[in-house]
Image (cartoon, rainbow, N blue to C red):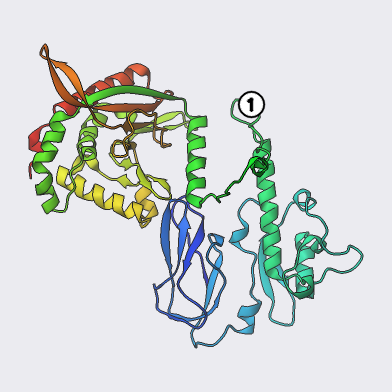
């Protein structure tokens, strides 16, 4: 049986193979992991759907796959694949969903018929590939490959073969179509226009920086590409405004010091972020338009009656935002325990995709790194994000007397289509007041 890449979760349809656990001849049990796939912000194990012997492995580390891509084939009797299985080769979902028409073709060869569903490449893109085989002679390929080429409109003279003598095989066709897709995507990106009607900036021309000195070129990871795309989308589609303030967290830090050991004994890690999460739940209930999403198509504002707060976690690979659900329903101990567990799983890239979805508000705390003021970018489709900076001791006037207090900078970035400056100011005033008047009863365990 053929094992294909299953759907990974909502909005996830591709990934890069990070580890292959099996090889040909291995016996596998049902639900045994056969490979690990890095899908945007998560690393997930792909299990075998049935027990059997690995007859063939179709992927290797570093391959980019789409949902439906052929991973391995399993044989129940431990032998190799049957002639029918050998003949059943597809240019499948790794080609992508961007090509125009889908063609299903029966190829008649000596073996049983081969069904080859494929996305036909655009002729304009194919024209960009130079001839690699003489035009006056047939391209070096089997009759079945030639038939597929004719049916799909592929000029085999432009396909570079990987076998001896430049012979073209099915893997070469797949690679050729993938390259055409990339060109087509670049052309569309250069031709797109913004909602305002102005043409978008075309893809930049590559600059040879090596002519000025030594360089190193580092390939962007799938995670970094996902972060870049998300940030560009948010910054270019949402009118950002950032409201700044600072909060006196001296009392919160005193409570943290008093109860930290008790929380540690119960598996919790009491941090300033825990205090902020508990405070935010109440403030968001008083300011529901900050716990919302804008549905532009319907012309409505979606006010959410749940409080699932995303926590920006710094990992070696980049920023990941897991979601802590139902913050308003949890005690400080539950929040501190779940927050620590969620952050650790995120740093190990063991976080599930559904644990990064469904957030209603996000918190980004750079205080631990040492940064103070910054302007966080909204994690769309949310409409606001709170940034926390490094706390610093300052002389503050209290009751006509100067006292040293620990002040933490706050930055609330919000979608100006949904909230105005006065709304943000009221939100911040309430947040600062709630942090400065945090009740010890909420911390006791």
The residue under the point 75% across, 61% down is 152
Relative to the observer, which residue lies in front, 250 or 385? 250
Q: Image quadrant of residue 46?
A: bottom left
Q: Residues within 10 Å of mark 1 (few under 14, many from 20)?
A: few
Above or below for 32 versus 243: below
Above or below for 433 versus 125: above
Relative to the observer, which residue lies in front, 286 or 309? 309
Is residue 133 visible in the rendered image? The answer is yes
The residue under the point 67% across, 63% down is 174
Number of numbered discs overlaid on the protein picture: 1
- Residue 289 pos. (x, y %): 33, 27
Is residue 104 visible in the rendered image? The answer is no
Q: In which quarter of the image is the C terminus?
A: top left
Residue found at the far top of this picture: 400
- Tell me the residue that label 1 is attached to: 197
Residue found at the far right of this picture: 136
């Amino acid at each position: 049986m053929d094992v294909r890449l299953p759907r990974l979760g909502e909005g996830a349809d591709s990934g890069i193979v990070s580890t292959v656990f099996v090889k040909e001849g291995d016996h596998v049990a049902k639900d045994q992991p056969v490979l690990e796939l890095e899908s945007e912000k998560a690393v997930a194990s792909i299990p075998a759907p049935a027990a059997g012997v690995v007859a063939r492995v179709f992927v290797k580390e570093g391959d980019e796959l789409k949902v439906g891509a052929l991973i391995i084939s399993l044989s129940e009797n431990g032998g190799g694949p049957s002639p029918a299985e050998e003949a059943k080769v597809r240019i499948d979902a790794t080609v992508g969903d961007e090509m125009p028409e889908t063609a299903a073709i029966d190829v008649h060869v000596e073996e049983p018929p081969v069904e080859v569903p494929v996305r036909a490449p655009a002729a304009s893109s194919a024209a960009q590939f130079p001839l690699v085989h003489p035009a006056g002679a047939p391209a070096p390929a089997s009759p079945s490959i030639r038939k597929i080429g004719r049916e799909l409109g592929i000029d085999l003279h432009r396909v570079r073969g990987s076998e001896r003598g430049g012979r073209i095989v099915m893997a070469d066709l797949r690679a050729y179509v993938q390259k055409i897709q990339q060109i087509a995507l670049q052309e569309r990106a250069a031709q797109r226009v913004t909602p305002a009607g102005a043409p978008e900036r075309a893809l930049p021309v590559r600059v040879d920086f090596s002519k000025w000195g030594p360089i190193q070129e580092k390939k962007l990871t799938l995670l970094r590409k996902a972060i870049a795309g998300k940030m560009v989308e948010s910054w270019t589609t949402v009118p950002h405004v950032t409201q700044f303030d600072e909060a006196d967290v001296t009392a919160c830090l005193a409570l943290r010091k008093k109860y930290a050991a008790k929380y540690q004994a119960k598996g919790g890690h009491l941090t300033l972020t825990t205090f902020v999460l508990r405070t935010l739940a109440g403030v968001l209930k008083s300011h529901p338009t900050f716990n919302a999403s804008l549905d532009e198509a319907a012309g409505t504002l979606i006010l959410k009656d749940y409080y699932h707060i995303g926590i920006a976690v710094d990992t070696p690979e980049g920023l990941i935002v897991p979601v802590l659900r139902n913050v308003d329903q949890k005690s400080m101990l539950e929040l501190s325990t779940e927050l620590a567990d969620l952050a650790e799983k995120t740093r190990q890239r063991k976080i599930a995709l559904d644990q990064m979805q469904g957030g209603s508000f996000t918190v980004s705390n750079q205080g631990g790194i040492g940064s103070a003021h910054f302007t966080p970018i909204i994690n769309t489709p949310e409409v606001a994000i709170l940034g926390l900076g490094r706390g610093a001791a300052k002389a503050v006037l209290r009751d006509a007397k100067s006292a040293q207090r620990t002040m933490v900078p706050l930055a609330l970035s919000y979608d100006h289509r949904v909230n105005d400056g006065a709304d943000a100011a009221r939100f911040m005033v309430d947040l600062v007041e709630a942090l400065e008047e945090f009740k010890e009863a909420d911390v006791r365990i």
